[in-house]
């Protein structure tokens, strides 16, 4: 089993920054893919960014150039640096880990972008 715990959410003004963290524990294999997803009120779950254990990265078009995903494999921790935040980034952000056919989710952390 794998447990994922997100932190770092909160209230920020438009144009501000936040850094989310996802700490993973349990049985984690060396080869895996971690990612951030989000769900805004009244909208569907959407992919934000993913990063493999080898360091390959992809971003949703809506966050390219503003968000940066990274991970520390030694600490089993993933990060999402979010800059130039917009009101439309308001959502619950979820951490995700996929390994050998299994998928795990955190409980989410709320990010609110508002003046």
Image (cartoon, helix red, strand yellow):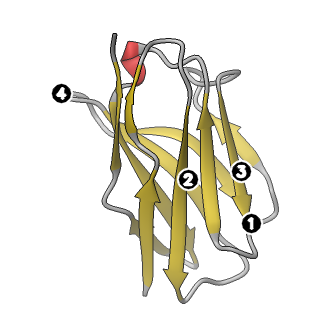
Residue denoted by label 4:
42
Residue denoted by label 3:
70
* Left or right, 80 with reference to 26: right
Give x and y (percent) for residue 53.
74, 66
Residue at image x 40%, y 51%?
A: 94
Give x and y (percent) for residue 62.
55, 20
Residue at image x 28%, y 30%?
A: 40
For marks 4 and 1, give the CA distance.
32 Å
Q: How many marks?
A: 4
Dot 2 and dot 4 residues touching (CB under 8 Å) = no
Mark in front: 2 vs 3: 3
10 Å crowding of disc 2: few (<14), some (14-19), many (20+) = many
Tell me the number on the disc at residue 35. Answer: 2
Dot 2 and dot 1 residues touching (CB under 8 Å) = no
Residue at image x 71%, y 58%?
A: 71
Tag 2, which secondary structure?
Answer: strand
Label 2 or label 4, whichever comes before in sequence order: 2
Label 1 or label 3, whichever comes before in sequence order: 1
Asked which quadrant contains residue 93, the reply is top left
For marks 2 and 3, give the CA distance.
10 Å
Label 4 or label 1, whichever comes before in sequence order: 4
Tag 4, which secondary structure?
Answer: loop
For marks 2 and 4, give the CA distance.
22 Å
Question: Does 104 appear above or below 28?
Answer: above
For marks 1 and 3, give the CA distance.
10 Å
Question: Does 15 appear above or below 105?
Answer: above
Residue denoted by label 1:
53
Residue at image x 38%, y 15%?
A: 87
Question: Does 75 appear above or below 54?
Answer: below
10 Å crowding of disc 1: few (<14), some (14-19), many (20+) = some
Label 3 or label 4, whichever comes before in sequence order: 4
Tag 3, which secondary structure?
Answer: strand
């Amino acid at each position: 089993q794998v447990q994922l715990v997100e932190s770092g959410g909160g209230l920020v003004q438009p144009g501000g920054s936040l850094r989310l963290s996802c700490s993973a524990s349990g049985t984690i294999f060396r080869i895996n893919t971690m990612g951030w997803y989000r769900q805004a009120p009244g909208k569907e779950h959407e992919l934000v960014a993913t990063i493999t254990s080898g360091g390959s990265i992809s971003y949703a078009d809506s966050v390219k150039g503003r968000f940066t995903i990274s991970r520390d494999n030694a600490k089993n921790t993933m990060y999402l640096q979010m800059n130039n935040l917009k009101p439309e980034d308001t959502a619950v952000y979820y951490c995700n880990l996929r390994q050998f056919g299994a998928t795990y989710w955190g409980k989410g952390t709320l990010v609110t972008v508002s003046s």
